[in-house]
Amino acid sequence: SNKVTPNWKLDLATLKKNQETLCLDCHLSNSNKQSQFSRTLINYDSSVHGQAIARGNSNAAICTDCHGTHDLEKASSPTSKINRTNVPNICSKCHLAVSQEYKISVHGIALSKGNTDAPTCTFCHGEHNINPIVHAPRRMFSDNQINPEVAMKTKMVYCVVCHTNENMMKKYNILTTNKAHDWLPSLAKHYESVRCIDCHSSYAPPNLSHNILPPTQTVKKCEECHNENSVLMSKLYKHEKTLSRQKYGFINGTLLSDAYVIGSTRNVFLDSLSIIIFGVVVIGLIFHALMRWYFYKGK
């Protein structure tokens, strides 16, 4: 039998792995009982939760942490643990601070009022395959002057997939992304340089990115950003540091962000220029030495 109950006196991580396996035996492996979400269940093991439990982290979420044990209900049931209105509460069991940010944001308030179009945790972070990229048609990016690669990297895609939807925005009397930002010059350049959350989330430390503010509280004047004491300085610098560490590694990204060291910061132009200068100097030294040797020999 499956060892899934505490009386087996197994360590908690092993017990949770067994419980997860038991659930997947039906909902993934049994073709007669496969869940409609089996395509996401396949990726559970590679998600942050699946990897954590595989490493023996007993705090990682498995099926029963979100769905419950014996009191299971369909997600469509208002009292279900996984009903969309209850999702923030489920996630808050581990991610309390982030969940509290979300609940006071425009999205969290909308959800609490019964707005089923409001995004919950799982819309951006996925259900079983935590941290997926939502499907977004290429035309959505081109029609709105958004670079798709940048949108994917900065996670802006999760915002624009809703806020470029004219029907949805009209339903709630909200301007679409382009109409809301038509006051911005060089719109495409701004989209490439600044993330949605940089302007639309809380500015007070620690810069809560899940606390999305109402339009009246967001940056709307050029001088609010383009001055020495920009309100976005801490956010943009923090984001630059994160991208720098991802691209160059933690040590290079942290220590060399304001310095240039050949081969470390990977500026191809400066690398090439430095190598050329170095080569010219070496050739000059060799030529100088040969000339001295030649004329010395002639004496």
Image (spheres, rainbow, N blue to C red):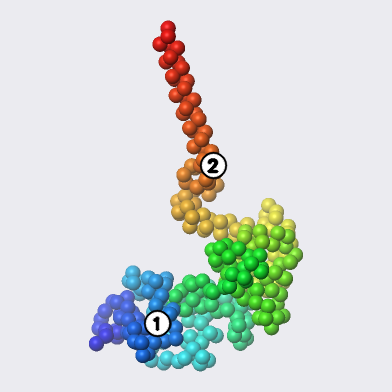
Q: Is residue 196 left or right of residue 5?
A: right
Tell me: residue 172, above or below residue 274.
below
Q: Is residue 62 left or right of residue 11?
A: right
Q: The N terminus appears in which quarter of the rendering?
A: bottom left
| x 73%, y 57%: residue | 223
Tell me: residue 47, above or below residue 245.
below
Nearer-the-camera pick, 26 or 89: 26
Q: Earlier in the sequence, mark 1 or mark 2?
A: 1
- Looking at the rendered structure, which numbered label has been put on residue 270? 2
- In percent of width and height, residue 209 lies at 58, 68
Q: Amino acid type of disc 1?
A: Cys
Tell me: residue 54, above or below residue 297.
below
* Pointer 2 local density, CA inside 10 Å: few below 14, some 14–19, many at least 20: some
State the residue lying farthest toward the front.
139
Q: The C terminus appears in which quarter of the rendering?
A: top left
Q: In the rendered structure, are the residues bearing label 1 and label 2 in contact, judged by CB atoms less than 8 Å apart? A: no
Residue 52 appearing in the image: no
Q: Amino acid type of disc 2?
A: Leu
| x 43%, y 11%: residue | 296
Q: Which residue is mark 1?
A: 63
* Pointer 1 local density, CA inside 10 Å: few below 14, some 14–19, many at least 20: some
- In percent of width and height, residue 126 lies at 49, 76
